[in-house]
Amino acid sequence: MQENLLLLPLTVYGPAAYAHRLAEAKQRISDLKDEELLALALELGHPVWTNDKDFEGAGVPLHTTADLLMLLCQGG
């Protein structure tokens, strides 16, 4: 399974990539375990794929699993 991930065009970001956005993320989200993901999303300007309600109102676009499945089923 893990070797399959190596075949994907993934970019790994360490904490240095989003460290300067952590303070902003901490103000936007109440769950401490979500701060780093939010900081990275803010830095990259990318949406977050989550079903976690803590991200609602955090200021980044969200996609739920249901949203993504619907898009895949529609072919777009």
Image: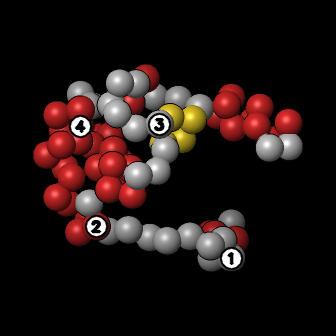
Q: Is residue 6 above or below residue 56?
A: below
74 to the left or right of 20 = right
Determine which residue is flagged by label 3.
61
Residue 16 is tagged as none
Q: Identify the image quadrant of residue 13.
A: bottom left
Q: Nearer the viewer, mark 1 or mark 2?
A: 2
Element at label 3 = loop
Quote the CA–CA distance across marks 1 and 4. 32 Å
Tell me whether circle 1 and circle 2 mark residues in contact (CB < 8 Å).
no
Which residue shows up at 33% across the image and 31% down it? Answer: 58
Quote the CA–CA distance across marks 1 and 2. 23 Å
Quote the CA–CA distance across marks 4 and 3. 19 Å
- The earlier-in-sequence mark between 1 and 4 is 1
Element at label 1 = loop
Q: Position of residue 69 (x, y in %)?
A: 75, 35
Determine which residue is flagged by label 4.
32
Quote the CA–CA distance across marks 4 and 2. 18 Å
Determine which residue is flagged by label 2.
17
Which residue shows up at 32% across the image and 40% down it? Answer: 34
Which residue shows up at 23% across the image and 42% down it? Answer: 25
- The earlier-in-sequence mark between 1 and 3 is 1
7 to the left or right of 51 = right
- The earlier-in-sequence mark between 3 and 2 is 2
Q: Is residue 50 visible?
A: no
Q: Identify the image quadrant of residue 29.
A: top left
Type of amino acid under label 4: Leu
Determine which residue is flagged by label 1.
7
